[in-house]
Amino acid sequence: MKALCTLTAAATLALAIPAHAEFALDSRFTDADGDLIADIPSDAAQQVDPDTLIFAYTPVEDPAVYAEVWQGFLDHMAEVTGKDVQFFPVQSNAAQIEAMRAGRLHVAGFNTGSNPLAVACAGFRPFAMMAAEDGSFGYEMEIITYPDSGIDSIEAIKGKQMAFTSETSNSGFKAPSAILSAEFGMSAGADFEPVFSGAHDNSILGVANKDYPAAAIANSVKARMIEREVVTPDQLVTLYTSETFPTTGYGTAYNLTPELQESIQEAFFSFDWEGSALAEEFSKSGEETFIPITFQEDWAVIRTIDEATGVVYACE
């Protein structure tokens, strides 16, 4: 983990791209202060103050497990905000973004790669990230295989199948696509067959069970799965490890009242991790607290990868 998430990407990816990718919000939103996230509506009639807050964590293989992990935190949020809080299990990044865009999701953790699309199209206002006690944060993308797969290098994936998670995922698709192209001259379709598993858990299990010969995954998810003994280290072989990226970004829908957004932020930063289910789960990947972040600064590297891979923030 690193306190500052930088890609040595001009060297690592060897791409002639600007330090900050072009980024624009959907026409539904305004950004008068230039911080790249939607402003809270100035007209109180356009602000919402729901009796029940709906919270969703980024899609995982078994949402029921994470509903239990998050419950203590959601109870704390309910106490701080004076609202009922419900966990909403989402099955895909697209469904999570659409739920917030439609006004059915108020507080969420969007994964690294889907953050820009959620900000641009759903009015997501990220403000927090999990980190270690010393403030360091981040994870790496790994390309993995299984022992005796016959794949002992990235180049050996040629002609075989490789699993990605979803097209909105940073470590599950966008970053490995850029790296494979820039460093190894390899592209999906031409050099290997791409398949999509839907989640990092699925990709990791798929490799461990020899359903996929190779996959691109977030090593923070792998660490938690090993700790839970869902998979064992000897089932997996790492072929490549990337630079460090920011993790899941937590935030609110843009049109919640200013007072409610402030109280939700207070809930994140006042939560006592000690002895919590959240600490038990996320300490497995070195995360033990929430720290403040900004989309403009902390997601610059992700927007750059998006530009390098031709991502368009289409909000139709």
Image (cartoon, grey):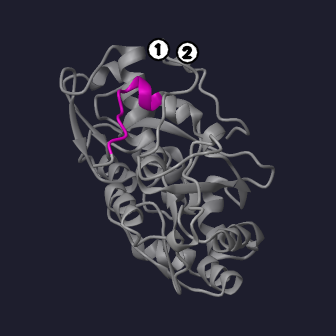
Q: Would residue 15 be visible to someone looking at this image?
A: yes
| Relative height, residue 110 to residue 241 (above, below) | below
* Quadrant in which residue 230 is drawn: bottom left
**What residue appears at the point 70 percent right and 74 percent down from the top-left corner?**
263
In this orientation, which residue lies closer to the viewer: 205 or 277?
277
Residues in magenta, as a range: 305-314
| Residue placed under numbered mark 2 in the picture | 10
Residue named by callout 1: 15
Residue 271 left/right relative to 300: right
**Extreme right residue here?**
134
Q: Is residue 76 left or right of residue 157?
A: right
The answer to whether residue 153 is visible is no
Contact (CB < 8 A) between labels 1 and 2? yes
Task: Identify the residue at image location x=76%, y=74%.
Answer: 272
At a point 63% along the width and 42% down the height, the residue shown is 35
Report the amino acid beneath label 1. Answer: Leu
The 10 Å Cα crowd at callout 1, few under 14, some 14 to 19, many 20 or more, is: some
